[in-house]
Image (tube, rainbow, N blue to C red):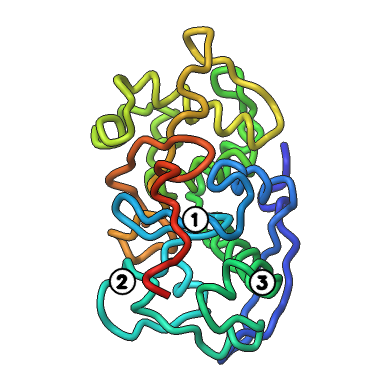
């Protein structure tokens, strides 16, 4: 069985105003998630739907702020214009949303924020979820990378419920179906299995022998209704259909974020 958290290399870094320890994410996992979220684009911006998701990992502003790089100044927490970049971002060479999207310093900061976000997901795995690593479910070998990818989609609290149920998707809210275009829990389960297999470098053809629902659905950026967990929240109440390769429809991807 693989050791849990072998995906990470633990680093100690100076973060204003304290010293924090976080984990650097493997390149293969980083590429897997960014491929699903943005086709690897650091500048893409999704203005449609519930959120203003931005960049390679489609961070919403409240999620990015939770990683220690912005300060909320008032207004809607869903808008980038309601935040200002703080000293930690300035130290990294990022002073604006345009810097974050279009400069090497901004790209490096997006990667650093994703490292922290992913480490937070990993640290929130339940004991049952950790124990599932190395097991085989529906022909898919469960790996740390696969579980993290599923957590990125579902929210880590919902992932823990899913694993604790024996990977029974019916424990997830019905909104996961209707809001995301799935007509059954079997289709949702096919998507989750395919996503976990992809993250682990393997394949999943679907319980029905095809992968119709493997690549056409995803999240509307990062849902921020549950602020206690970075990114999607502990459990994600709603998702919407995604038109690959971007979050939302291509025509919703605009040149500016939050008027900045």
> Residue at coordinates 63% horizontally, 32% vertically from top-left?
198
Q: Is residue 249 above or below residue 210?
A: below
Q: Nearer the viewer, mark 1 or mark 3?
A: 3
Q: Position of residue 138 (x, y in %)?
A: 54, 18
Question: Tag 1, which secondary structure?
Answer: loop
| Labels 2 & 3 near each other (Cβ < 8 A) | no
Q: Where is residue 85 in the image (x, y as percent from the top left)?
A: 49, 83
Disc number placed over residue 77 in the picture, else none: 2
Q: How many numbered callouts?
A: 3
- Distance between mark 1 and mark 3 Cα atoms: 17 Å
> Residue at coordinates 63% horizontally, 49% vertically from top-left?
40
Please indicate whether residue 61 sits to the left or right of residue 145 in the image.
left
Q: Is residue 40 something one can see in this rendering?
A: yes
Q: Where is residue 151 in the image (x, y as percent from the top left)?
A: 48, 46
Disc number placed over residue 103 in the picture, else none: 3
Disc number placed over residue 219 in the picture, else none: none
The quarter of the picture where the N terminus appears is: top right
Q: How crowded is mark 3: few (under 14 residues within 10 Å), some or many (20 or more)?
A: some
Q: Residues within 10 Å of mark 1 (few under 14, many from 20)?
A: many
Front in this rendered view, residue 206 or 60: 60
Q: Earlier in the sequence, mark 1 or mark 3?
A: 1
> Residue at coordinates 34% horizontally, 50% vertically from top-left?
235
The quarter of the picture where the C terminus appears is: bottom left
The residue at which mark 1 appears reads as: 58
Q: Where is residue 59 in the image (x, y as percent from the top left)?
A: 48, 60
| Labels 1 & 3 near each other (Cβ < 8 A) | no
Q: Earlier in the sequence, mark 1 or mark 2?
A: 1
Q: Which of marks 2 and 3 is nearer the N terminus?
A: 2
- Distance between mark 2 and mark 3 Cα atoms: 24 Å
Question: Tag 3, which secondary structure?
Answer: loop
């Amino acid at each position: 069985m693989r050791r849990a958290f072998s995906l990470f290399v633990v680093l100690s870094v100076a973060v204003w105003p304290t010293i924090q320890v976080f984990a650097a994410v493997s390149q293969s996992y980083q590429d897997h998630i960014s491929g699903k979220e943005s086709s690897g684009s650091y500048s893409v911006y999704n203005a449609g739907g519930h959120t203003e998701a931005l960049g390679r990992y489609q961070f919403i502003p409240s999620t990015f702020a939770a990683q220690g790089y912005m300060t909320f100044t008032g207004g809607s927490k869903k808008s980038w214009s309601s935040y200002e970049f703080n000293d930690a971002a300035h130290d990294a060479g990022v002073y604006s949303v345009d810097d974050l999207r279009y400069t090497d310093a901004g790209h490096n900061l997006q990667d650093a924020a994703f490292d922290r976000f992913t480490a937070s997901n990993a640290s929130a795995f339940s004991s049952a979820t950790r124990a599932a690593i190395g097991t085989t479910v529906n022909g898919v070998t469960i790996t740390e990378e696969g579980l993290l990818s599923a957590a990125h989609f579902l929210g880590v609290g919902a992932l823990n419920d899913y694993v604790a149920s024996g990977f029974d998707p019916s424990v997830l809210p019905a909104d996961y179906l209707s809001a995301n275009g799935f007509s059954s829990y079997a289709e949702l389960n096919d998507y989750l299995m395919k996503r976990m297999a992809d993250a682990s470098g393997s394949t999943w053809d679907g319980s029905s022998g095809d992968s119709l629902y493997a690549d056409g659905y995803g999240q509307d950026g990062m849902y921020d209704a549950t602020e206690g967990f970075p990114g999607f929240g502990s459990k994600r109440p709603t998702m919407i259909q995604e038109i690959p390769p971007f979050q939302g429809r291509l025509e919703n991807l605009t040149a500016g974020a939050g008027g900045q």
